[in-house]
Image (cartoon, rainbow, N blue to C red):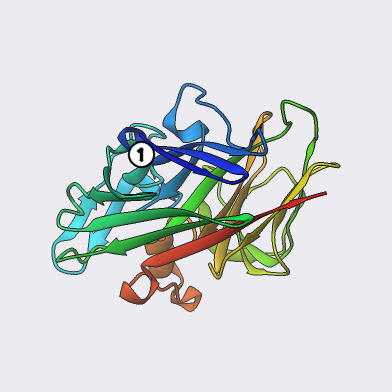
């Protein structure tokens, strides 16, 4: 377990449980949902070496063919990678390292969490080693809908387009205009800076160069605003629609986000 105590922030990182940022306290208020029975549903966690669902858990290497990913959490599909269900190694203050299992054997992930004045900087880097499987990364912060001391959650988010979902809830390779909430959708062409707001308490701006964002609002206790290097099922979407031009190679194996806390 790692602890960061810096000015207004107290942060707890549970390396044994997916290097999950299990607690984010700012000025004595908690901004991460507690454990709710599944590693999918709490804290702030990293998504890697894939983000979102992979259809049927099947992913293809250009040299070794098709590989089966675990599908036990959301069968029959794989979801959110190995990182959030693995035990990581602490390698320094706020830094965690994971050696990935097969079929991503030889690859590693490094997560870094830092406090910068009024902000949290969260970064994730994938080193493929000798692994040539496609990889894409992201973050999955769970923001509570209501704070213990009051303050209802609202959020600001605008995008040019999103990917249509199929009957199984998986993003396809077809673009559509953003529809009404609730969302469990992948967006691109982000306008402005996404933000989470608690009335009369706080505004959290989420700054990232990530080209894709997933927003999830279908939970009664929290929402997720997730910067990602590529959308869910990216490898299969690329094969179905090369016009998407998703970069899953070494030039896109790093993601970073800055969560800026501004009192209202």
Tell me if residue 49 can be seen. no
Expressed as whole percent of the image width and height from the top left, the position of residue 12 reads: 46, 36
Out of 162 and 33, give the one closest to the viewer.
Answer: 33
Mark 1, residue position: 18
Rate crowding at label 1 as few (under 14), some (14 to 19) or many (20 or more) other CA atoms within 10 Å.
Answer: many
In this rendering, the answer to whether 219 lies above or below 93 is above
Q: Name the residue: 40% across, 55% down.
A: 112
Q: Name the residue: 84% across, 41% down.
A: 199
Q: Name the residue: 80% across, 35% down.
A: 152
Expressed as whole percent of the image width and height from the top left, the position of residue 136 reads: 39, 61
Snapshot quadrant of residue 182: top right
Q: Name the residue: 67% across, 66% down.
A: 161
Element type at mark 1: loop
In this rendering, the answer to whether 113 lies above or below 78 is below
Q: Quadrant of the N terminus?
A: top left
32 on left or right of 249: right
Snapshot quadrant of residue 86: top left
132 on left or right of 15: left
Tell me if residue 38 can be seen. yes
């Amino acid at each position: 377990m790692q602890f960061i105590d810096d000015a207004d922030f107290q942060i707890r990182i549970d390396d044994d449980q997916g290097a999950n940022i299990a607690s984010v306290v700012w000025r004595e208020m908690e901004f991460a949902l507690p454990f709710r029975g599944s590693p999918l549903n709490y804290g702030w966690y990293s998504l890697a070496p894939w983000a979102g669902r992979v259809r049927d858990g099947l992913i293809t290497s250009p040299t070794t063919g098709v590989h089966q990913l675990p599908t036990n959490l959301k069968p029959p599909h794989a979801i959110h990678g190995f990182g959030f269900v693995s035990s990581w190694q602490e390698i320094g203050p706020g830094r965690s390292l994971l050696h990935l299992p097969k079929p991503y054997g030889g690859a590693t992930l490094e997560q870094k969490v830092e406090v910068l004045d009024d902000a949290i900087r969260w970064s994730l880097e994938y080193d493929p080693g000798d692994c040539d499987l496609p990889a894409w990364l992201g973050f999955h912060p769970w923001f509570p809908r209501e704070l213990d001391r009051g303050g209802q959650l609202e959020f600001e988010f605008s995008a040019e387009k999103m990917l249509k979902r199929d009957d199984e809830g998986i993003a396809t390779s077809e673009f559509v205009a953003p529809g009404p909430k609730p969302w469990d959708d992948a967006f691109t062409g982000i306008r402005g800076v996404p933000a989470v707001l608690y009335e009369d308490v706080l505004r959290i701006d989420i700054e990232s160069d990530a080209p894709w964002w997933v927003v999830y609002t279908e939970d009664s206790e929290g929402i997720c605003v997730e910067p990602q290097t590529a959308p869910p099922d990216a490898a299969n979407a690329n094969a179905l629609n090369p016009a998407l031009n998703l970069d899953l190679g070494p030039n896109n194996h790093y993601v970073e986000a800055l969560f800026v806390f501004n009192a209202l």
